[in-house]
Image (cartoon, rainbow, N blue to C red):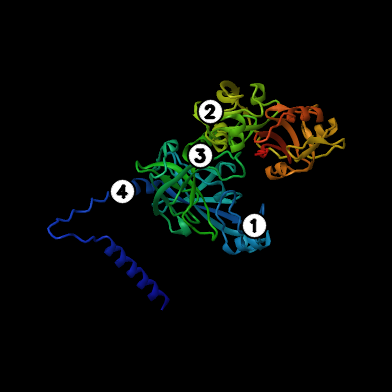
Amino acid sequence: MTSSILRSSRLSLLVCCALAGTAAVAPGVQAQPAPAAASLPDFTGIVQKNAPAVVQVEAKYDGGGKPRLRGQAGQGGMPDDPQAELFRRFFGMPMMPSPAERAHTSLGSGFIISADGYILTNNHVVDHADKVIVRLQDRRILDAKVVGTDPTYDIALLKVSAGGSLPAVSIGDSRSLKPGQWVLAIGSPFGFDYTVTQGIVSAVGRNLGPGDQQDTSFIQTDVPINRGNSGGPLFNLQGQVVGVNSQIYSSTGGYQGVSFSIPIDVAMNAVEQLKTKGYVTRGQLGVYVQLVTDDMEKAYHLPDASGAAVTDVSPGSGAEKAGIQAGDIILGYDGHAISSPADLPPLVAMTKPGTRVPLEILRHGKKQTVQVTVGTMPRDQDAVDHGGMAPGANSGSAALGLTVQPLDNATRKQMNLKPGQGVLVGDVTGDVAAQAGLQPGDVILMVNQQPVGSVEAFRAATRGVKAGSTVLLLVRRDGQNRFFGLTVPDDK
């Protein structure tokens, strides 16, 4: 009965649409033919040419070594087990597998990038596998050696020996992709090998990590991607690989219209490093950045909100040596425009350490270009939480609605601050600071780009605050810096 109702509803909808498309024609008036619809692309040539270079990847786990938790497909991967994912969502932890469950095979996809047997796939497809094999379209089964992996980019490089030349894909340019372009995926969803799906590019430069510090910007598409597609190629209409299918956004564990691929230029950068040294190094600028807010636009008198606002500079970094300061707004990196903070980390990460690059910044309303030598990002960089409060006499700003206290040098050292840097927010006394999000325990480092290191300096910097003006504070909280804009209500 239910299906009949659905069929009837669909039929009614089709009829209504057809009727709506037929306009009444007055007597004696000749009906104009409808404009011809643009023809859809034919993907058969792309599939015939490239399918032999796509492989099914099988990662085998014998139950030994590092235990693998059910529902964890690895960084950025899709969950293996919907039940385990449900368990994790409701109880906050994954299910521990039994010894029998730990001996299993995980399926994914990959593609041959060179005739001598190098294969590209996702790290989460082969992570901690005891053995990896690949199945070719001609049904050959080959043992694969894991040459190297990079969990950050979610890339794994495999190598097989086939006793001859293998078919390989052509590598395209993911930087030329634009939303609306047709793309095609070939992979093995749910084990159905050589499944072809198509769609369009929904967005480029998509950041999926917390904040704006992630090293990879993804290609977002509406190409149907499911479990088993991970590691497979994403093609453009020229039959070139432009991405590596990696993730989906889903509340059910299955495809819901939003898929993400690693740009091929990022993946191939990792491949070359994995071939030569077995691991991937990334460039590091030494800055923390945030969005340019409306309050910053007002305070800095900016034409728009483009760029990445520097909130902190790491001591000893290339940025510090080049003179980059908190409060600078980065507009360009090595010839690439920076329209938002998410644009910067991927560009820096792909820069070879030791390279000297031009950085376009805006400081005090004036554009300038500085040369920065890119450093090396530590491969195991641990986050450190800093805290601490110092007693002292309260003072502050009634207009801004907060009081501040001095910081002693011991507390500054604990918080990784320099001597004479910052004042502590003792209390939030008014609506202006409260509405802006200030909290007791925050450390104010700058007022309108002027450093403050004492209660007296803070009072001097805020003494001339007028009704209707916006004051920009650089604040350290939980070991990270960010800007807060405090707008004083107009008396009128």
Kind of residue at badge 4: Pro
Residue wearing tag 3: 267
Q: Between residue 65 and residue 298, name the one nearer to us.
A: 298
Mark 2 or 1, closer to the camera: 2
Q: Tell me the element at label 4.
A: loop
- Left/right placement of residue 345 relative to residue 408 reads left
Q: Check disc 1: other Cα within 10 Å, few if <14, some if 14-19, many if 20+.
A: some
Q: Earlier in the sequence, mark 2 or mark 1?
A: 1
Q: Could you tell me which residue is drawn at 23 percent across and 60 percent down? A: 23
Is the residue 450 above or below the residue 486 in the image? above
Front tag of 3 and 2: 2
Indicate which label's residue lies in the foreground, 3 or 4: 4
**Marks 2 and 4, the one that precedes in the sequence:** 4
Crowding at label 4, few (<14), some or many (≥20) Cα neighbours within 10 Å?
Answer: few
Q: Position of residue 476 (x, y in %)?
A: 73, 37
Q: Residues within 10 Å of mark 3 (few under 14, many from 20)?
A: many
Label 2: few (<14), some (14–19) or many (≥20) C-alpha neighbours in 10 Å: many
- Disc 3 from disc 4: Cα separation: 27 Å
Q: Is residue 3 above or below residue 178?
A: below
Which labelled disc corresponds to residue 41? 4
Residue 322 placement, left or right of 20: right
Residue plotted at (43% across, 56% down): 193
Q: Quadrant of residue 414?
A: top right
Residue 69, numbered label: 1
